[in-house]
Image (spheres, rainbow, N blue to C red):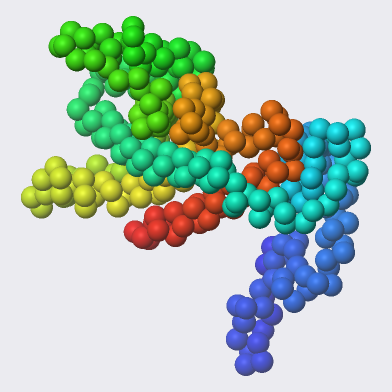
């Protein structure tokens, strides 16, 4: 229910409308603050807190506490001997962070990660958009079959994917080697070459992640009103003009989401080099996540590995903010 109080001139003042039970306004919020806090903890809100408790316990146990502990660990020389007594770890300040930028192996892994992202993300987003446009326009009854076909690698175990790709890239008995021998050529050793190993992993990652981008773009394309497309065609727009002036601008929010999520996934790349090359040959496929794993769980330099994690987190945050800035929706 709303009440209206007259102003000084006798005209009802709309700004003085106050909804009963609608909570405190800006002027009274401070006076009612403690009361509101008590209401949130009242018995009436008990079921809400009860349903929220499992999430809060899991979040604090497996997310918040490890994140804070890892951050503190990055300022110490935490190793295997400190696991039983974490407070015995020696505090060394920013030494782990300064060591990182003098560590040639870490710098190589950082370069490899950027190499993987710079080539892999545009290829994945472009291939996903291309497949989605084709499925949205040219394929009718078989659309579901193609969707499943493109999306199947996403849900396939990385171990099974590795077996298939090792067979494809094997220089002696692989698929490419067999096709090359048919025309009198010799297949290179893709995974044993310093030059070809990383491009091979990029192709594999694009193939594996193409399905996710395709499904998201397809959903975005189906959300574009058909009236807009028809109006563009009536105005004489060709296929390319329709794609450039209608599809791409209206697909911008989807493109932003796909780009951000794909970039975050590629910056955290771990599985592909771990199962295919273990970072070799000569660290040519060593990424930051794989280097972090080796430092933390092979050499037990957990403090040093924690500093790597926070450097990677800072890079991901910076790249994500840059993408949000460059690709934000300008159609509104």
Query: How many badges with numbers are in the image?
Result: 0
Residue 319: percent from the left, percent from the top?
Answer: 49, 53
Residue 157: percent from the left, percent from the top?
Answer: 51, 17
**17 is higher (above) or lower (below) than 196:** below
User: Which is nearer the eye, 250 or 107?
Assistant: 107
Whether residue 44 appears in this view of the structure is no
Residue 198: percent from the left, percent from the top?
Answer: 40, 32
174 with respect to 324 (left or right): left
Residue 202 falls in which quadrant of the image?
top left
313 with respect to 132 (left or right): right
**284 is higher (above) or lower (below) than 11:** above
Q: Residue at x 47, y 45 (%)?
A: 111
**176 is higher (above) or lower (below) than 37:** above
Q: Residue at x 84, y 72 (%)?
A: 31
Q: Residue at x 65, y 87 (%)?
A: 7
331 with respect to 12 (left or right): left
244 with respect to 278 (left or right): left
For the C terminus, the quadrant is bottom left
Q: Residue at x 50, y 33 (%)?
A: 283
User: Which is nearer the eye, 36 or 237?
Assistant: 237
Residue 304 falls in which quadrant of the image?
top right
For the N terminus, the quadrant is bottom right
Whether residue 318 appears in this view of the structure is yes
**53 is higher (above) or lower (below) than 204:** below
């Amino acid at each position: 229910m709303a009440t209206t109080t007259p102003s000084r001139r006798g005209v009802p003042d709309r700004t003085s409308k106050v909804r009963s039970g609608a909570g405190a306004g800006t002027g009274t919020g401070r006076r009612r603050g403690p009361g509101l806090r008590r209401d949130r903890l009242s018995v009436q809100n008990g079921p809400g807190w009860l349903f929220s408790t499992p999430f809060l316990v899991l979040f604090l146990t497996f997310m918040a506490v490890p994140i804070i502990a890892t951050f503190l660990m990055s300022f110490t020389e935490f190793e295997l001997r400190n696991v039983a007594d974490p407070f015995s770890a020696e505090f060394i300040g920013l030494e782990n962070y300064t060591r990182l930028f003098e560590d040639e192996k870490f710098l190589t892994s950082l370069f490899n990660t950027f190499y993987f992202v710079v080539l892999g993300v545009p290829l994945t987003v472009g291939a996903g958009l291309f497949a989605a446009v084709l499925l949205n326009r040219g394929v009718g009854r078989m659309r579901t079959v193609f969707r499943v076909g493109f999306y199947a690698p996403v849900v396939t175990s990385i171990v099974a994917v590795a077996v298939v790709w090792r067979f494809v890239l094997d220089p002696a008995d692989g698929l490419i080697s067999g096709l090359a021998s048919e025309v009198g050529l010799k297949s290179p050793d893709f995974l044993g070459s310093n030059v070809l190993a990383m491009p091979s992993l990029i192709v594999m990652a694009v193939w594996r992640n193409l399905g996710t981008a395709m499904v998201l773009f397809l959903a975005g394309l189906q959300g574009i009103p058909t009236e807009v497309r028809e109006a563009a065609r009536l105005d004489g727009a060709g296929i390319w003009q329709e794609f450039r002036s209608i599809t791409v601008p209206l697909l911008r929010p989807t493109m932003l989401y796909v780009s951000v999520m794909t970039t975050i996934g590629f910056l955290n790349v771990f599985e592909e080099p771990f199962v295919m090359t273990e970072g070799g040959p000569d660290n040519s496929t060593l990424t930051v996540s794989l280097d972090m794993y080796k430092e933390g769980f092979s050499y037990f330099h957990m403090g040093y590995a924690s500093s790597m994690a926070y450097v990677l987190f800072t890079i991901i945050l910076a790249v994500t903010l840059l993408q949000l800035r460059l690709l934000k929706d300008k159609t509104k």
